[in-house]
Amino acid sequence: MLAESFFSQAGLGGFGFRWLHILAGIMWIGLLYYFNFVQVPAFAAFGDEARARNIAIDKVARKALWWFRWAAVSTFVTGILITVITKDYFANEFGKRAGGIGISTGMLLGTIMMLNVWGVIWRNQKVVLANAANVLGGGEANPDAPAAGRKAVMASRQNAIFSVSMLFFMVYQTHSPNSGATVSSGHMMTYWIITLVIIAILELNALGLMPWKTQANKGLNVLYDGKGVRNPIIAAFGLWVIFLILTEVLLKAA
């Protein structure tokens, strides 16, 4: 068997871009957890110390958000390159096997999370950053900044909730003992209907499109609020348990 070069199709698709994908993903998800579990609670603790909070937003959050958003798109792009460059990536009944269905779910969650970063989090954080810089410069506070911050936090919290299941499915294809099982059409359809409904409800909630909109501790927004970061963590692992049950019940050999 001939050795493959790192720069061959197999080397780049199966190893090179996968390595970069993991590297970028560590940066992205690591910063996602930093924002949700460290920065947001820490900034809230500033209380009435508005100047200190604005300095932290302008000097710390601005830099962290740069790495965060570009790590997100780098993770997405390298993931796409893996599927494009790897020979026959979608072959061998990819969509009918448990592993293929699992990695497809992970791809779906990752894509939604990346769109949340650029379409919701970064768009609203630009308002917050501009407001902090303006106030520090002696200007008037933007009355829209708090609402923008709330929208960014909701999307970020939802990304944190999605991330546990996304990471589960990203390793499911290769490491799950059931990944090679061929799933029946009925089970596959049931799995996707339940999965898509769950994801749609949670994402619509994160976008403030439910009746309670962005109100704190109302409806499904309790997943993002409450004391500390307990609720998002419980929600993240609760969602993972639901997906674990779905895979155990429905992604079995026909």
Image (cartoon, rainbow, N blue to C red):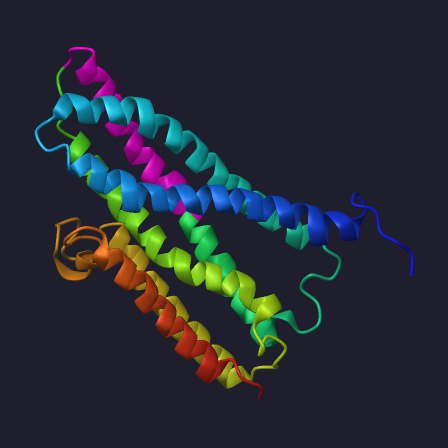
Left or right, 2 with reference to 253: right
Where residue 137 appears, as percent x and y from the top left, is 20, 11
Foreground of the two, 202 or 71: 71
Left or right, 109 with reference to 55: right
Quadrant of residue 150 in the image? top left
Residue that lies at the very extreme toward the left in this rendered image: 48
Name the magenta segment's main secondary structure: helix
Q: Is residue 129 above or below residue 214?
A: above
- Location of the N terminus by quadrant is bottom right
**Residue at screen point 78% across, 45% down:** 6
Q: Is residue 67 above or below residue 16?
A: above
**Residue at screen point 29% across, 46% down:** 37
Where residue 57 appears, as percent x and y from the top left, is 26, 27
Residue that lies at the very extreme toward the right in this rendered image: 1
**Residue at screen point 22% across, 53% down:** 224
Q: How many marks?
A: 0
Is residue 126 one of those drawn in magenta?
A: yes
**Residue at screen point 36% across, 51% down:** 159
Residue that lies at the very extreme toward the top in this rendered image: 138
Left or right, 118 with reference to 173: left
Where residue 234 appears, as percent x and y from the top left, is 27, 63
Foreground of the two, 38 or 183: 38
- Location of the C terminus by quadrant is bottom right
* Residue interval drawn in magenta: 114-139
Q: Is residue 246 above or below residue 111?
A: below
Left or right, 55 with reference to 141: right
Is residue 5 one of those drawn in magenta?
A: no
Where residue 30 appears, as percent x and y from the top left, is 42, 45
Quadrant of residue 32 in the image? top left
